[in-house]
Image: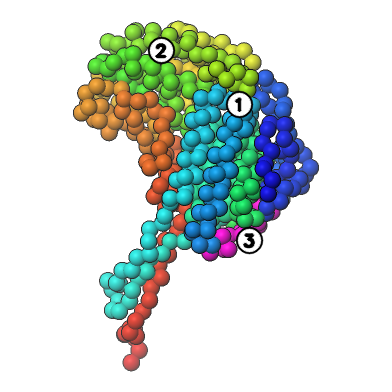
Amino acid sequence: MSAPTLEPQADWNQLYIDGEWRDATGGETIPVENPAKQEVFTEVPAGTEADVDAAYEAAEAAQSDWAATPRAERNEIVQNLLDELNARFEEVAGLLATEAGTPGYRAMGEFATATGDVEMALELEPPEEEVRPSPSVDDKDNHIVYEPVGVVGVISPWNFPLHLSLRAVAPAIALGNTVVLKPATDTPITGGLLIAKLCEAAGVPDGVVNVVTGRGSEIGDRIANHPTPRVVSFTGSTSVGKGVAEQAGKNLALPALELGGNAPFIVTDDVDLERAARAGAFGSFFHQGQVCISINRHLVHESVYDEYVDLLVDHAESLVIGDPSENEDVTFGPVQNETQRDDLVEFIEGSLEDGATLETGGEADGLFVEPTVLSDCTNDMPTACNEHFGPVAPVIPFSDDDEAIELANDTEYGLSASVFCEDAERARDLADRVEAGMVHINDQPINEDHNAPFGGVKQSGLGRYHGEWITQELTEPKWISVQGEERDYFVFE
Ligand code: NAP
């Protein structure tokens, strides 16, 4: 097997189904843009429902052999995938910069998390087979075994394309399932076709991983409502995720949903403000704020409010803005697409109309939206009550801990949150009272560790990634009972 070609101008115009590169059945393609330049650099196939059907057919056909492959052999292949990925950091970083406006430091972070996804998958183990004597029938043993669920549909977003696709694909295949992956249309390469090339190079058997690029509006329903998958793993917005759950429910496939967030960042009156503001700036401006767990609202005690805002402004103005595909020193790139930019400008303008003060930023040029700090904000302003998903930091004052919690929880979302507070007991009390799946004390909320459950409450999702939590979603417990001596059925003489 020759080494895959991974540069942006490589041939990306075929789907990967059943171990073969195929044209989309409709013959149409979708242009892919570099967001910094707003220029098309390649085209990918516009997959159709017929392509989705073919991909599921291949995944279903491959599933029983893959599940029966001893775990050690499956792991050898997953390890090959990890080796293929590890050998290609430079090329992958180049693709992330071109396709997703990813600065170099963030590419390193995404690469480390993505390789961590595969490393974790190698370690995942369903519980060992257990035998329990029946409590109701004499001489019966109940064996509890865990089997792969079967075929898994994966739909991923554009903001961390490589990581968020591999976070589902790697555990699914390691645990004996097969996969059909549909990446986001803004990032079809790093979220999909790149992974297909790496799987091919790693010797992943035909049909075990299939990649169909195409518009969610055209093939998304078919990915979710096809009768084959038993789990549909979706990462993306809450509105689309609810539709996916409805479609998956038609065939009683389990919807595993990682959805939107609106993370509060609580700063109390006893903190080292320099430290809190540095963390706050990172949590708002990392990857231009396009992270489901980035800070959406800064909730700051009124006694330190002005000083905090000044520090945040200093950090926002120190970022190096530019095209990550041309300059390695850039720390702040473009947002992903025009919808993102237009929504952000609308949210900023709406907040200013409602009485917020513009401390810095606020302008957009092409797809570059300036790092923006807004003071005098309230929880009902557009930048605060919506998941703005961009480089905007609305700062809201509070007067005591109860008010901080009330503000923090006044959102439909419950993904991630942070509490900056010196007093450990008070910090823990605040963390316990925040309604979120993940709360970080004395850090900003952008964290992901493979040994901790990742996911949200309220409208932020269903289920959890990583470790035993994803293992449970991707395997089914099965009860096999073994009767010894003939039992007495009472009704017969
Ligand atoms: P999105 O618009 O919901 O899209 C996500 C994926 O769904 C894309 O692959 C998209 O395809 C596809 N899709 C679109 N319409 C569909 C349909 N009707 N049926 C099935 N799939 C469909 O989200 P996004 O804009 O890519 O990502 C941003 C959102 O993702 C934010 O809300 C963010 O918070 C959330 N997110 C959550 C997590 C988490 O772990 N909780 C992580 C990252 C992002 P197309 O690209 O072709 O439209």
* Residue bearing mark 1: 97
Q: How many marks?
A: 3
Q: Name the quadrant containing residue 103.
A: top right
Residue type at mark 1 is Ala
Residue type at mark 3 is Ala
Numbered mark located on residue 312 in the image: 2
* Residue bearing mark 3: 61
Label 1 sits on a secondary structure element that is: helix
Q: Is residue 65 magenta?
A: yes
Residue type at mark 2 is Leu
Residue range in magenta is 54-68
Kindly identify the residue that appears in the image at 35 percent across and 25 percent down: 443
* CA gap, disc 2 and disc 1: 26 Å
Numbered mark located on residue 347 in the image: none
Q: Residues within 10 Å of mark 3 (few under 14, many from 20)?
A: some
Earlier residue among tags 1 and 3: 3
Q: How is the image coloured?
A: rainbow
Of 283 and 119, nearer the camera is 119
